[in-house]
Amino acid sequence: MNRERALAEAVELERKEEEFHLRQAKERSTIRLRDGRGKPIDILSMNLNASAEEFDLNAEDPIYIFAGLSLKEMRNLKQDIRVHLELDAEQEAHKEFWQAMLVVCEAEEAEAEAQEARDRARLQGGDPGTVGYEAGLHASVDDDIKNMFTGKSFDELVIMEEGIEEMIRNGDGEVEYWDAVLKRLRVNKSRVQLSDIHRKLWQAALAVQAPKQKAALRQAAEEEEEKQDTGA
């Protein structure tokens, strides 16, 4: 009994410690954003944790957070995402968000590294078309593979993923090729998942904020009309 109590106390202590570190991380994010020093992770965390009343309806889809980031900034963001995945995983929706963010971030980092390698090859007079692509996937078919997933929903991508996994298990087709396809499918699935999460947050916020905005506009119009009547 004492051992069970000690174990329960240890688990509770660990939970409280994680909550403390998460609060500290959120406070640091708030300070950086307030001071105009916000990092990409601050924007992601703020939008994910915002209430429906506070959510910024102009917030961009999180998949665009990587635009304009240097390779070093992507690597820093990846570490920040890992921290949040460890600390902010009690809610299943948050856990799924950070897991998907990590998958996409690692893919963006790999692409940035590959682009650097292609740029170096080009400067050195080499063939950049063969640099930065994994076995089983030639540069000329990379875009074709990406187009396979265009317009697919999360559920449709899950079905595709299961089908490809079965093909690989059965040894059907060229395994290296389908491994490469599967890797890209999972990245695309994570992107779609992030967009779905963002859309749900946006829709929930709109449902709360839109009526209040309409009421405020109506009140302002009525007050303006009263002023005009009084002036007349």
Image: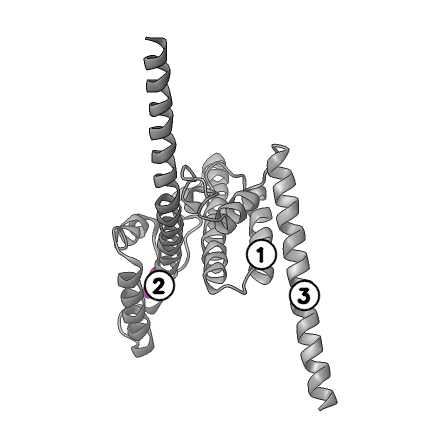
10 Å crowding of disc 2: few (<14), some (14-19), many (20+): many
Amino acid, disc 3: Lys
Q: Quadrant of residue 19?
A: bottom right
Residue at point 33%, 69% (across, down): 175
Quadrant where the C terminus is found in the figure: top left
Secondary element at tag 1 = helix
Secondary element at tag 2 = helix
Amino acid, disc 2: Leu
10 Å crowding of disc 3: few (<14), some (14-19), many (20+): few
Of residue 222 and residue 16, the one placed in the foreground of this image is: 222
Of residue 132 and residue 219, the one placed in the foreground of this image is: 219
Q: Nearer the viewer, mark 3 or mark 1?
A: 3
Q: Is residue 30 magenta?
A: no
**Magenta-highlighted residues:** 178-182
Which of the marked residues, 2 or 3, is nearer the chain's N terminus?
A: 3
Residue at point 30%, 51% (across, down): 146
Q: Residue 210 placed where, x, y %?
A: 35, 40
Separation (CA) of disc 2 from disc 3: 39 Å
Which of the marked residues, 2 or 1, is nearer the chain's N terminus?
A: 1
Q: Is residue 225 left or right of residue 30?
A: left
Secondary element at tag 3 = helix
Q: Which residue is mark 3?
A: 16
